[in-house]
Image (cartoon, rainbow, N blue to C red):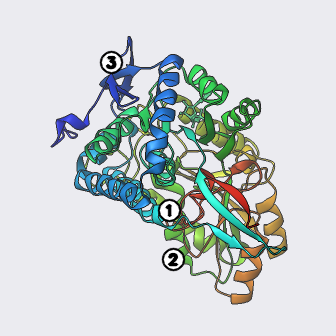
Amino acid sequence: NAWTLTRGDLLRTEAFVGGRWVAGERRLAVTNPATGALIAEVADTTAADTRTAIDAAAAAMPAWAATPAKARAAILRRWFDLIMANQEDLARLMTAEQGKPLAESRGEIAYAASFIEWFAEEAKRVYGDVIPAPHGGQRILVLKQPVGVVAAITPWNFPAAMITRKVGPALAAGCGIVVKPAAQTPLSALALAVLAEEAGLPAGLLSIVPTSDARGVGEEMTGNPLVRKLSFTGSTEIGKLLYRQSADTVKKLGLELGGNAPFIVFDDADVDEAVKGAIASKYRNAGQTCVCANRLYVQAGIHDAFVARLADAVRALKVGDGAAPGIEVGPLIEEAAVEKVERHIADATAKGARVVCGGARSALGGTFFEPTLLVGVTAAMAVAQEETFGPLAPVFRFEDEADVIAQANDTRFGLAAYFYARDLARVWRVAEALEYGIVGVNTGLISTEVAPFGGIKESGVGREGSRYGIDDYLEIKYVCMGLN
Ligand code: ADP
């Protein structure tokens, strides 16, 4: 078995509710998307379990918030060390439940751990202010305090990193947090909790509630007045729903929603570098990331050369079970994901696009799909407006800089954008003109714990990671002190 673990106890099937491992009454099946095989059945928790977890977080929080930051940081640091010490096991679990190639899973575990390390350090740097007062006999102070109990809802495409990106700053700030992982990938979440407990995190501060009742648990999280902040990563549709549901209790919100990333290659680009960047940005995680290039715009002067080289690189990608050595593109998460890619290809070809390579399900069967390249794509096609979330690269040809910027910005989304160019003035012009929260210049990979990740427009609210990432977990309190 390719995912046999060194530490069998990291495959945990109970839910972690208020510091207790609970089996629950019903079970949730977790399957391997590469083989369809059943991996495990985990506890299928309810809205009532979520309420228990929220109560436990609220009860554990005051002592945690009063713990010196240095002591909170030490526990987070131990958790980071334990995640890295068990990187291989965690990566195998992830590939088994999510499908991404083992090399990517190892990378995600390191990326996930980096948020715990980073926020362990940031915990010690939550500074307040002393503001010069306008009147004598007064002092004006600003204190930063934990926002309160946090609820987090996370997706299946990054089963570990989307959790640590929220749990890291929440715990660092002095909050307790309840996490609902995606139903497809609860095992990575539960394994992280095993290690948090081992690191010495006090009971109740972290709960993991896998469930088949996302709606019921979501309603508890948004309706419960004890929850002061909701952090969600997932689809724009569910993000909007949770935004509405949170209105009644006026929660703070962090939303990381869908994208529709443009990837622009100008005539003065280094074509080989642009091809490398396009492969990394588009086909990583089989195209299932919210920062994946969704639309490739290539300037007329280098269009044909770029397409020819990209086609060679796409044909060379190795598709298969992510647990096997050398695999670069795993299966899609489920059948509906494959159908969306098929729909985008059918719509584009019906409107005049041409398939250069791929274009169909893989001979491997299941949810494997051939890495696909389309040319002759236009704004009238569905791929121009919708996020494909699969291994499909649609290429648009363009002539003029102002025109491509207008096209790139012609979307409700604003998460990540990429472009390749060498002219310095153009680099500044385009970086400033793109209406996105993240811009990659001459690179296809932008994620790091030290930089603020987040979108504008309908891609979301707030930033995760970096020194800004802890702000959403803190309230500002102004203290006006009279000295008379
Ligand atoms: P995807 O289509 O990529 O699965 P979703 O937005 O549906 O994206 O899923 C992201 C997360 O949101 C998952 O944890 C999922 O269970 C959760 N979710 C889905 N529907 C709801 C809902 N009505 N309330 C709360 N959470 C939800």
* Residue of label 3: 23
Q: Nearer the viewer, residue 268 or 306?
A: 268
Percent position (x, y) of residue 157? 48, 43
Q: Is residue 160 left or right of residue 80?
A: right
Against 189, residue 397 (above or below) is below
**What amino acid is at disc 3?**
Ala
- Marks 2 and 1: in contact by CB < 8 Å? no
Return the mark for residue 79: none
Q: Is residue 38 left or right of residue 158?
A: left
Image quadrant in which you'd find residue 375: bottom right
**What amino acid is at disc 2?**
Asp
* Residue of label 2: 272
Mark 1, other Cα within 10 Å: few <14 / some 14–19 / many ≥20: many
Q: Secondary structure at mark 3?
A: loop
* Residue of label 1: 279
- At x 72%, y 29%, the residue is 245
Percent position (x, y) of residue 94? 34, 42
- Marks 1 and 3: in contact by CB < 8 Å? no
Mark 3, other Cα within 10 Å: few <14 / some 14–19 / many ≥20: some
